């Protein structure tokens, strides 16, 4: 497997050489930056003196002719300074004759030809010590074989933008303890949920895992819209790995309410967990995961998520890892030498990596945008620190001072679209926004120039994507360009920015071309943290805002009517979201929007403002549509309409229609009562609406309770025989306990009888818990660890590795 060493920094290369020699010789070795201790990069210090000195020359892709002068100069400089064993390691390509000539150059230190290692020797050592390559993951993630596989894989055809991002960002990846921990989690549970604050590196870690699995022969897929994307590509008896990035939405728990997929998500997690040939990687913001586990019953009841065994909290980086993140971005950025030296003065880099607000996304953004910032080169370090002090000021400065009016307007529009959008739809949305202000409209030529200017820093562009949108004049062989925001944090900034710009908000409302834009503005108005009383009625939970998280913003008085008007105006407008075709993954099709989801957003906004924004005829249409869907729904899909019923039951004059819809839902639910969840939801149909019972509903509720009493003995007996693991038992216990507590409220079941219903399952838990405390990995012996511990006795304590690291920048 040919490896690409060019993505290694000089420090990366020294670490690789050190790790290879440690593995080869079974001793611990030290690393030093160029210039320290007379040019020593790696050494073995034993019994108070140097036993081995290694000089590293990182010259990837170069030949002996290109580095001869550098080596000759190095040989004259060191002369006969060392009387211990001396080695020279380079990433250049050397022949046997080249090595013999180099040995002559370094005759003063007695350099043996066998102690000169070039790129072929490094490849050989990596084959001998594969664990070193796993730990130096930049090697396998950038190997020609992996990159070729990546670019030719189904993942590339289905998720070209994801592949391009992995390829372009690979040199910036930093290896941390989160990586092996997540691999162990995937090995043990087949599912890994990576949570953490925005910008902490969740997606980067997920992408690294995905490429590792790809290199190991797994077929990899990326879910772009919802959990259905995984179901579509599921192949029995095939090793498949799935990535579902931001599976609960990027900016709000409310984003995920539209998906109605908590049950399907829990089912897929359990299905993957029970499969030996599937793996699932998911990422989410930490506070959204916490909220979702409180709001969604299936996520709350899922033992797989509740016990935390599959949740990796990427909450922080160590000091060394922060240093590596900052170093990588500075080293690989096109920064002037003066800018680099600014972080070396008085070790200013320590202020950056020790800053309380250190965040990899901010570091990436400031290093990528410094050249256009207008800040003097010698103030680069101050620029970075100021960005960490107040990230919003950084966004504001760039947004207001470094962008043209057209560029700002396009980013505002794209932030409201929130998802991948086709370029012609984006231009239409931009023109509609511009027309709302009465200004000139951007033509297609200028639009293309603006995309080119913003690409990379602000947006990502996927060209020549096959689209099938026959309803709007596009046929399967048509190609176009898809656009999306490069940085999810920009949406957070725009939301906060608009909260202080009432005039701009109303222009955004009037200038919406797609329902999704008005929906975004409505979600921002409803608030990211659902803390008001109306939403508590729906979510049945009170959330405290996470630390440093902004409070919900409100539209200016009177603007709510304009926003509802935009939602009504665009209620039947085709969606601007594109998804993979179910028939051909290489083709994107326009997403078929859900009337239910659009009606839900309208009802949520109306509920916040006293239920007086939706026109009466529109409200009637919403009720009529929900009733029609209920009549045609199956028992398995009817429950997703119930959320609308909760809202509609609170409107005056609608009780009779809601009662009729409630009775229809109940009738459908009574057709399928197979699990405790089915009974739980069916009972809620009768108890959770603010409408009076009817003769029909009373009869149905009585029948439901009777059938539940008959269901219990057979279900818990069968479940006790089915479960095989502690987490399965605990999950079954949790589900059954919750349903029993709801059904006992009327006194149908005595407390002692309730406890008896749990005994068989509890016995299963207790039996397996007897073995749960054993740690199969804890039996590793000293001999199993090999030289990794024994080598510690040989070396003197090294200096601060962070100082060593940054001294290699110049």
Image (cartoon, rainbow, N blue to C red):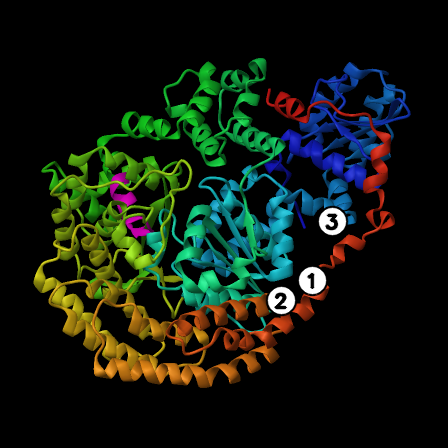
Using residue 732 as the reference point, say whether residue 285 is left or right of it. left
- Per the model, the C-alpha gap separating discs 2 and 3 is 35 Å
Circles 1 and 2, Cβ within 8 Å, touching? The answer is yes
Q: Nearer the viewer, residue 721 or 402?
A: 721
Residue interval drawn in magenta: 411-424
| Image quadrant where one finds the C terminus | top right
Residue 62 position, x and y percent, is: 65, 33
C-alpha separation, residue under disc 1 versus residue under disc 2? 8 Å
Q: Which residue is mark 1?
A: 772
Q: Is 208 or 289 nearer to us in this picture?
A: 289
Secondary structure category for the residue under label 3 = helix
Residue appearing at x 49%, y 81% in the figure: 712
Secondary structure under badge 2? helix
Which residue is the site of mark 2?
Answer: 726
Which residue appears at 31% of the width and 47% of the height?
Answer: 531
Question: Is the C-beta separation of discs 1 and 3 under 8 Å?
Answer: no
Q: Is residue 152 above or below residue 368?
A: below
- Nearest the viewer among 292 and 733 is 733
The answer to which of marks 1 and 3 sits earlier in the sequence is 3
Is residue 94 in view? no
**Is 611 positioned to the left or the right of 9 in the image?**
left
Residue named by callout 3: 130
- Local secondary structure at mark 1: helix
């Amino acid at each position: 497997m040919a490896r690409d060493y060019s993505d290694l920094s000089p420090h990366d290369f020294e670490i690789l050489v050190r790790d290879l020699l440690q593995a080869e010789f079974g001793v611990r070795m030290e690393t030093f930056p160029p210039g320290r201790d007379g040019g020593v990069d790696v050494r073995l210090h034993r019994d108070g003196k140097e036993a081995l000195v290694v000089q590293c020359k990182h010259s990837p892709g170069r030949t002996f002719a290109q580095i001869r002068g550098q080596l000759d100069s190095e040989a004259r400089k060191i002369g006969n300074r060392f009387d211990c064993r001396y080695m020279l390691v380079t990433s250049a390509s050397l022949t046997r004759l080249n090595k013999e000539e180099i040995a002559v150059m370094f005759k003063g230190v007695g350099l043996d030809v066998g102690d000169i290692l070039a790129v072929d020797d490094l490849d050989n050592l990596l084959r001998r010590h594969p664990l070193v390559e796993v730990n130096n993951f930049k090697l396998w993630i950038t190997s020609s074989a992996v990159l070729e596989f990546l670019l030719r894989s189904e993942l590339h055809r289905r998720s070209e933008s994801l592949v391009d991002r992995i390829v372009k960002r690979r040199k910036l990846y930093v290896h941390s303890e989160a990586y092996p921990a997540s691999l162990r989690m995937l090995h043990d549970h087949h599912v890994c949920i990576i949570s953490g604050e925005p910008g902490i590196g969740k997606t980067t870690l997920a992408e690294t895992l995905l490429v590792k699995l790809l290199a190991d022969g797994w077929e990899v897929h990326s879910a772009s819209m919802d959990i259905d994307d995984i179901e579509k590509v599921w192949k029995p008896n095939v090793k498949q790995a799935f990535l579902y990035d931001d599976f609960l939405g990027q900016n709000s728990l409310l984003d995920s309410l539209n998906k109605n997929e908590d049950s399907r998500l829990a089912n897929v997690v359990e299905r993957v967990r029970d499969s030996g040939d599937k793996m699932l990687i998911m990422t989410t913001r930490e506070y959204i995961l916490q909220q979702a586990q409180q709001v969604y019953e299936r996520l709350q009841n899922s033992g797989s998520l509740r016990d935390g065994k599959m949740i990796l909290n990427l909450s922080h980086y160590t000091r060394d890892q922060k240093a590596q993140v900052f170093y990588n971005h500075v080293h690989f950025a096109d920064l002037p030498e003066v800018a680099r030296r600014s972080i070396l003065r008085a070790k200013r880099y320590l202020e950056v990596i020790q800053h309380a607000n250190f965040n990899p996304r901010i570091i990436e953004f400031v290093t990528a945008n410094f050249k256009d910032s207008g800040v003097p080169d010698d103030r680069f370090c101050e620029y970075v620190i100021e960005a960490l002090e107040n990230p919003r000021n950084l966004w504001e400065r760039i947004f207001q001072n470094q962008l043209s009016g057209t560029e700002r307007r396009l980013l505002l529009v794209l932030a409201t679209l929130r998802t991948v959008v086709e370029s012609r739809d984006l231009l239409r949305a931009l023109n509609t926004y511009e027309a709302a202000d009465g200004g000139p409209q951007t033509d297609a030529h200028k639009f293309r120039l603006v995309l080119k200017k913003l690409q990379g820093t602000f947006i990502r562009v996927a060209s020549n994507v096959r689209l099938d949108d026959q309803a709007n004049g596009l046929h399967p062989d048509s190609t176009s360009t898809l656009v999306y925001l490069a940085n999810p944090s920009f949406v957070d900034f725009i939301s906060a920015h608009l909260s202080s710009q009432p005039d701009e908000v109303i222009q955004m409302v009037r200038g919406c071309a797609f329902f999704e834009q008005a929906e975004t503005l409505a979600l921002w108005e409803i608030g990211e943290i659902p803390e008001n009383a109306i939403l508590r009625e729906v979510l049945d939970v009170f959330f405290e805002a996470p630390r440093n998280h902004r409070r919900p913003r409100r539209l200016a008085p009177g603007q709510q009517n304009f926003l509802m008007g935009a939602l009504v105006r665009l209620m039947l407008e085709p969606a601007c979201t594109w998804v993979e075709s179910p028939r051909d993954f290489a083709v994107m099709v326009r997403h078929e929007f859900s009337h239910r989801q659009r009606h839900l957003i309208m009802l949520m906004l109306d509920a916040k403002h006293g239920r007086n924004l939706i026109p009466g005829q529109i409200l009637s249409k919403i009720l009529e549509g929900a009733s029609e869907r209920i009549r045609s729904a199956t028992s398995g899909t009817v429950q997703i309409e119930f959320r609308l019923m909760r809202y509609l039951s609170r409107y005056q004059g609608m009780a009779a229609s809601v009662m009729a819809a409630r009775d229809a839902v109940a009738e459908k639910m009574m057709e399928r009562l197979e699990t405790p969840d089915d009974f739980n939801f069916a009972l809620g149909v009768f108890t959770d609406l603010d409408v009076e019972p009817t003769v029909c509903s009373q009869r149905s509720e009585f029948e439901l309770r009777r059938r539940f009493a008959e269901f219990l003995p057979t279900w818990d007996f069968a479940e006790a025989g089915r479960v095989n693991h502690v987490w399965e038992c605990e999950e079954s216990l949790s589900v059954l306990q919750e349903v029993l507590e709801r059904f006992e409220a009327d006194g149908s079941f005595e407390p002692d009888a309730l406890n008896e219903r749990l005994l068989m399952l509890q016995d299963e838990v207790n039996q397996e818990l007897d073995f749960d405390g054993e740690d199969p990995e804890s039996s590793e012996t000293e001999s199993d660890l090999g030289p990794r511990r024994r080598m510690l006795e040989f070396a003197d304590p090294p200096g601060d590795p962070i100082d060593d690291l940054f001294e290699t920048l110049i």
